Amino acid sequence: MVKINPYLNFDGNTEEAFRFYQSVFGGEFLAMQRFKETPEADKLPADAQDKIMHVTLPIGDNILMGTDALESMGPPLTMGSNFSLAIDAESREEADRMFDSLSAGGQATMPLQDTFWGSYFGMLTDRFGVQWMVSYDPKPVYA
């Protein structure tokens, strides 16, 4: 079954925001990875090293995810459009189909590819301006 979860982008205060959400909804973080823990860490400025690369907080049967949107890694963050919908596909083929269909008339911002964290992953903006993250995880972390 395909799952869709919100993915939030913050301007350097992801950890603060997610600790707040944790205080509201409870639960334990499934992941909290900092940029300094990634293979590309040596290419990032010193002030970005402790920022959050990825965090996940389960809320009921859903997962709230987030990151610090580093200015050095893309366009500046715009509040109000600082989120994506993350889709977890059940196969690579399904991920390809959904990615290709959603990006038709839109723009692929990161083609589907195998990533260092083990997912087949890509990002796009559809023709209506909605940002999507499509992922297939052969060994799902979130069940």
Image (cartoon, helix red, strand yellow):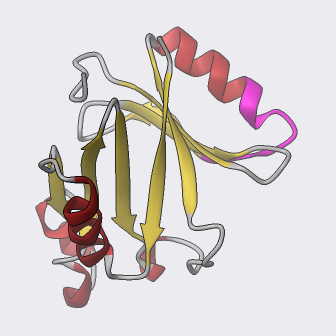
89 horizontally vs 80: left or right:
left
Viewer-side residue, 15 vs 24: 24
* Residue at position x 76%, y 43% in the image: 126
Estimate the x, y position of residue 100 in percent, counting from the top left: 71, 26
Residue 54: x and y in percent read 28, 56
x, y percent for residue 137: 32, 23
Identify which residue is drawn at 47% across, 11% down.
1
Task: Residue at 26%, 71% (x, y): give it.
Answer: 20
Residue 108, horizontal then vertical, whole percent: 68, 44
Residue 123's quadrant in the figure?
top right
Quadrant containing the C terminus is top left
- Taking the image as shown, residue 83 lies to the left or right of residue 126, namely left
Compared across the picture, whether 49 is left or right of 127 comes to left
Quarter of image, res 14: bottom left
Q: Give the magenta part as a residue range.
A: 101-109
Residue situated furthest front in the rendering? 24
Q: Residue furthest bottom?
A: 47
- 31 lies above or below 134: below
Q: Nearer the viewer, residue 41 or 17?
A: 17
* Residue under the point 36% across and 63% down: 67
Q: Is residue 128 above or below residue 138?
A: below
Residue 23 painted magenta: no
Front position in the image: 25 or 11 = 25
Judge by depth and name the residue closer to the eye, 70 or 82: 82
